Image: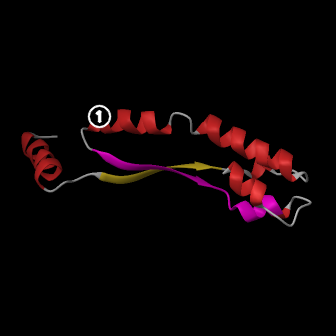
Amino acid sequence: MDIKQVTETISMIEEQNFDIRTITMGISLLDCIDTDIERAAEKIYQKITTKAQDLVAVGDEIAAELGIPIVNKRVSVTPISLIGAATDSDDYVLLAKAL
């Protein structure tokens, strides 16, 4: 990078409110499939809380390193209908609560 690029980047951040709108962590829940909806819900909860526990902190570290604000940090998961369809239940409320 040359000084012109650095200056332009600083200008975009300060004057034009340049930011990174969103970072997304994708988590596959396919290994959480279980015929028992309660077990599936527990697996989902444990996986998301384990895998994404540092998402905000890491996003903040990246923002600090780059000097560019990251506005949103989010998690994207496998469509819950795929997990629910493998259970013995017609009601997916437990899965929704786990999410």
Residue at left offset 57%, top offset 39% = 52
Residue at left offset 78%, top offset 61% = 92
Compare residues 41 and 62 and report the one nearer the observer.
41
Left or right: 77 with respect to 39? left
Residue type at mark 1? Ala
- Residue 23 drawn at (x, y percent): 43, 50
Left or right: 17 with respect to 15? right
- In this rendering, the count of numbered labels is 1
- Give the answer, above or below, for where 96 lies relative to 1: below
Residue at left offset 17%, top offset 40% = 1
Q: On the image, numbered disc 1 is attached to which residue?
A: 64
- Residue 20 drawn at (x, y percent): 32, 51
Left or right: 86 with respect to 56? right
Residue 77, magenta (yes or no): yes
- Residue 25 drawn at (x, y percent): 53, 47
Compare residues 93 and 4 and report the one nearer the observer.
93
Instruction: Determine crowd level at label 1: few under 14, some 14-19, many 20+ residues with C-alpha closer than 10 A.
Output: few
Q: Secondary structure at mark 1?
A: helix
Residue at left offset 81%, top offset 48% = 40
Residue 81, magenta (yes or no): yes
Please give the range of residues in magenta: 69-84
